Image (cartoon, rainbow, N blue to C red):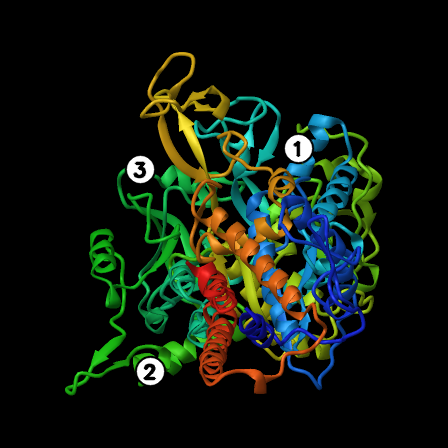
Amino acid sequence: MASAWRRLGFYVSFLKSQQDGGPGIISGGRRVIPGWARDIYSATGEWTKEYTLQTRKEVEKWWHHRIKEQASKISEADKSKPKFYVLSMFPYPSGKLHMGHVRVYTISDTIARFQKMRGMQVINPMGWDAFGLPAENAAIERNLHPESWTQSNIEHMRKQLDRLGLCFSWDREITTCLPDYYRWTQYLFIKLYEAGLAYQKEALVNWDPVDQTVLANEQVDEHGCSWRSGAKVEQKYLRQWFIKTTAYAKAMQEALVDLPEWYGIKGMQAHWIGDCVGCHLDFTLKVDGQVTGEKLTAYTATPEAIYGTSHVAISPNHRLLHGHSSLKETFRKALVPGKDCLTPVMAVNMLTQQEVPVVILAKADLEGSLDSRIGIPSTSPEDTTLAQTLGLPYSEVIETLPDGTERMSSSAEFTGMSRQDAFLALTQQARRKRVGGDVTSHKLKDWLISRQRYWGTPIPMVHCPACGPVPVPLQDLPVTLPHVPSFTGKGGSPLATASEWVNCACPRCKGAAKRETDTMDTFVDSAWYYFRYTDPQNTQSPFNAALADYWMPVDLYIGGKEHAVMHLFYARFFSHFCHDQNMVKHREPFHKLLAQGLIKGQTFRLPSGQYLQREEVDLTGAVPVHAETKERLEVTWEKMSKSKHNGVDPEEVVEQYGIDTVRLYILFAAPPEKDILWDVKTDALPGVLRWQQRLWALVTRFIEARAPGTAPRPQLLSDEERAESKKLWEYKNSVISEVTTHFTEDFSLNSVISQLMGLSSALLMRTLTPWEVR
């Protein structure tokens, strides 16, 4: 027996020995803790032998404020230490956390703590993606101001995060709906405008003819009707603001090769961007030799052959036939449905000054997202057929040499160049003259950011009758949201009703002008927030370049796979743009990505498609049935949702099992990238509970082994015990190596827990006497 106790003390000798408390005393199922054991746990000076729910909660309560205090220390940029920037996608403050939030933030918190223990300079910031349509809808439904509703939700969710024991860098907290944040969103928009990357044009929107308002896609139901009025939604052309993301398509496509850690996501990004083999070029439009003031932008996959253009083709769905174009009637008169129609409108290439006719195609759908393209017979059999059918002249501009190489002919200064050299030279010249030339794909569209909503970042532009659109001077930012007395969800943009705010002086000529009343898509707010975390209190610029260069790129970005395309694309775009503006030295914002899976709940559905609450389900038989009608139910696992009655309240689960148990279960139930089927009856939850109990038992035995107050001495061990100790030491080293690899390479935190379970079991088994094993 004494030998077993000696082994236990030696094996777990990583615990300090500070012999200031004397021997342990057993009393009423609790054990008085010697002073040297206070590093383990002690609030009362006693040790509870059984690891009950009450004990778990006492442990969590004792540690809560201590961990929080340590985490609250400001993380300054200390260049003498290696840094680690872990970032989880910030939440929309809906008012209540769901289990998906708990999963992503538990993962980031766990990895941040590990990196801190390695001596890294770590930030794990948190903020709020606080603008958006739900707040505006809540204002309409509850007769509240969106700001009041949003701030109240933030306070509640901040408390929820705190109760979960999550240690964020709260000194870096940001909120996108506050002027000190969206001032810099507006600043970046103006920089984009100055660079020719923000512009206005007509675009289709969802229009509610009853409420006379624009609807977001989320406000249109599956039948194409308005969520509010029930009216059939119409498509209507309005002038909208765009960000020219296509200008960075090729650069962002090529940069994917520098992101080897983007497992499974690179392909999604590449597919979204498409093959960048062509470009758009701008044309002015004439009728009867007169310039109309209208402009047409069209795509070609072979810009090097632009001097062989025979026509510019547009879809019958093009805005020029349906919007507010001055040429709408001219085009409509030429239109014959189902036929390729030659029009009297001539398109003048702004790069080559060539004039060619505009043709309305018989087919409505062109390649990818295109509604117009440049017809070049030299490179397209389809264009050759169309030109010959309509009797359009064209030139052959590609000459094939005897060795099979191709070079340009009849192409002005590009004549004699290889096709590849001509492609590069012509697109470069077009970019320099700002008449197109950005190499992109036929499927990628520019980013429409206009929203006819109140609760969003105001677009910092002024419309002047004399000067046209004029950006607000940088020193006058932010353009803050005005007070709007009520929200009805009807009519145009709510900002248009704030007449004192709308009517202003033109920043350029000082004449009467009007502010832009659209607000920005909330994806703009989240496209650069990772930069702001590096310098959140800066009042002179969006962020300090030196601080951004220290912390960036984000070492690990964690979030749902549903954001792997649009959000990541927009975030990468802003990072590339800021790099080109000499604001940061890194082009790509995120080094590694962890796209975690969903937490799914069990659903019970009638044949009609109606979802039932669990209380309405009879589970006593072989198959689940409706308790009232006895209809057989379809049982599935789906993303947790109120409408599907399969959600789980994190606070209720924590109350039932304790914080640590819930966090361990979430990490252990599946690899982070896989979905979790939330069922506490499975092996995962009982497994982590058993492990916690084994750990507690191990520490309890250690305390008992050390109770006499003398530290174990290795020289007292037998040869057999020494050999056993060496094996355990080697096993411990192996576990450390495996755990470190999982934490830093593949983030398989479930495997980390499995390794630690094995180590604790090995330690526990080596403390058992032979009769205990039997």
Classify the position of the N terminus by image quarter.
bottom right
Q: Which residue is mark 2?
A: 415
Is residue 301 depicted above or below 666 in this figure? Answer: below
Front residue of 407 and 138: 138
Q: Which x, y percent locates residue 313?
A: 35, 53
| Residue name at image x 70 percent, y 54 percent | 59
Q: In the drawing, does residue 673 fall left or right of residue 633?
A: right
The kind of residue tagged 2 is Thr
The kind of residue tagged 1 is Asn
Q: Residues within 10 Å of mark 1 (few under 14, many from 20)?
A: some
Front residue of 351 and 650: 650
Front residue of 540 and 406: 540
Residue furthest toward the top?
Answer: 629
> Which mark is drawn over residue 336?
3
Spatial CA span between label 1 and label 2: 60 Å
Spatial CA span between label 2 and label 3: 39 Å
